[in-house]
Image (spheres, coloured by chain):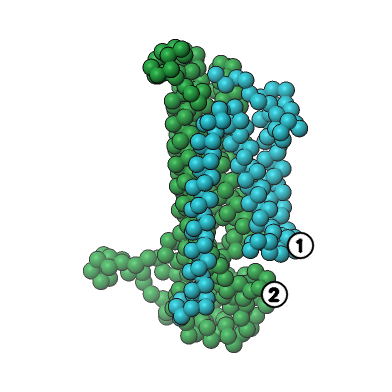
Chain colours: A cyan, B green
Amino acid sequence: MATDHKLEIFRGALKFKSNTQKIWGVLILLTIVTVIEVILGIIKPEILMGYVFGMKALNWIFIILTIVKAYYITWDFMHMRDETPGLRRAVVWTAIFLIAYLVFILLQEGGYVFSVYDEGYIKRDF
Amino acid sequence: MSTTVVNAGSDQTWTGGNEPLKASYGKMMMWFFIVSDALTFSGFLAAYGFSRFKFIDSWPIADEVFTHFPFLHGVEAPMYYVAFMTFVLIMSSVTMVLAVDAGHHLNKSKVTIYMFLTIIGGLVFVGSQAWEWNTFIKGEFGAVKTKGGNILQFVDTEGHRVAIGDFAIADAHAERVQQENKNGLWFVSEGTLPSFTVDEVLHGLEANDNILVRTQTLTEEGHKTVLSREESIKLIKTYGVKVVEGANLKENEYGSPLFADFFFFITGFHGFHVFSGVILNIIIFFNVVIGTYERRKSYEMVEKVGLYWHFVDLVWVFVFTFFYLV
C-alpha cells in the first residue's frame, strides 16, 4: 500500500508534514498558476506580444504554465511521484513522445496548407 | 493489495503473482488506459491545431466568442466563466485525492464525504458546460454568410459588435414559411429559418450610417478587419447569401465552421468523460457506503477511479489552454 508518500515538491525546497497538507499546498499552487493565466489572458500585455521561435511569447507562457499544472496534477494528485521509475517512464515517456510527434506533424502540415492557399494558385475565398 | 491475483510468494520469480512495478494489475491497466485516452484527446487537439494553422489569418478570437457569464447579461466577461469551470474541476480533483488519502487510512466516513463532494463538483462542471453550449449555440449578434462560406459580422464606428436585430429592417412581405416534410415538397425539409433575410439586413445597413462590416481576416495586430461603408454595402449586396444566427455543425456566426465543430467535439468528448466519471464515482460512492471496501480492507477501487477523475481534470487543463487562452 502506498502510504509512504514523498512529501516534498520543488525538488525538496518545500516539505509538507502530511499527505493532506501536501494536497492543499498543490491546490494553492495550481490556483495561483490558473489565476496568472487568466489575468494574462485578459490583459494581454503588449510586451509579451512579440514573436519568440515563431510563436507569441504570451502563448509560450501559457503552454509552459499548462505543462507545469499537468506535472503537479500527475505527480501529486495521481501519485506518480510514489510509483516505481519503471511505471512512471512507461506511462510518461510513451505519451510525451507520441504526442510530440503527432503535434509536430499536424502543425507542420497545417502551416504548409495555409501557405498553399496564401501564395499558391488554389483559392478558397470566391 | 492484490485482490484478484493469488500471491505466490516473492521468492518464486517466474510463477506469477509478482508485481515488478509495485502496482496492482488494475491500477497499472488504468494507467495504460489513460495513456491511450490521452492520445485520443491529443489527436483532437492536434487536429484543432492543424485547422487553426490552416486558417491562421482568419481564425475566430476565443476572447470575443466566450464573453458570457450567467446572470450578467450584456456584460463582457471574457474567460471568467471558463476560469470558474477550471477551478470547479480542480477543486473536485482535490476532494478526490483527499478521498483516496482517507481510503489509505481506512476511514470510511471521510471517504464517503469526499466522494460525495467530488460527485457534486463533477455535476456542477457538467451543468456549466451545458450552459456554455447553450449560449454558444444560441449566439448573440448574428452574421451574414457569403457565397464562399465566409462570415461577415457587424460593428459600429467604435468597433463594438452590433446584433443584426438592432438595425435590420423587417419586411412583412418577405416572410417565408419554414418548409417541413409534411407540407412542402414531399419529404423535403429545411432547418429553422433565420429571423431576417439578407435583403432586410442590407436595407438596415443602408439606412444606418454607423454600421460597418467586419470580415474574418486578421490584421497585423491580430484584430479583425473592419471595412469602409461603401465596401460594406457592396460586399453584403454582391456576396451575402444567408443570415447565420448561433452555431451548428455546418455554420456559425463566429467564423470558420471548423471552430464550432471542434468546440462541439472537443468539449463534448471531454464532457462525456466527465459524465462517465461522475457515473463511476457514484457507483464507487455506493460501494463505499454499503461497506464493500471496508470488508475488503482496501480502498484501492477509490484510487483507480481517482486516477480516471484526475485524468479528466488534466485534459481540461489542456483544453482550457488550447481552446480558450492561446
Circle 2 residues within 10 Å: few <14, some 14–19, many ≥20: few
State whether residue A86 is above or below residue B166. above
Q: Image point 59% across, 60% down: which residue?
A: B62
For disc 2, the chain is: B
Tell me the number on the disc at residue B132: none
Please name the residue that numbered disc 2 is placed on: B158
As helix, strand or loop, the secondary structure at mark 1 comes to helix
Residue located 52% across and 31% down the image: A87
Residue A3 image position (x, y, % from top left): 60, 19
Q: Do residues under tags 1 and 2 come within 8 Å of each other at their CB atoms?
A: no
- Residue at the image point whose x is 69% and y is 57% from the top: A58
Q: Give me the chain letter of mark 1.
A: A
Looking at the rendered image, the quarter that the N terminus of chain A falls into is top right
Q: Amino acid at mark 1?
A: Ile
Residue A61, x across and y down, in percent: 68, 53
User: Please, is residue B2 above or below residue B210 in the view?
Assistant: above
Look at 44% across and 19% down and name the residue there: B18
Viewer-proximal residue among B25 and B125: B25
Disc 1 versus disc 2: nearer the observer: 1
Q: Amino acid at mark 2?
A: Glu
Q: Judging from the image, what secondary structure is the residue with disc 2 in?
A: loop
Q: Is residue A10 above or below residue B143?
A: above
Asked whether residue B52 is in view, the answer is: yes
Find residue B259 and report its horizontal and vertical position in percent.
50, 62
Residue A47 marker = 1
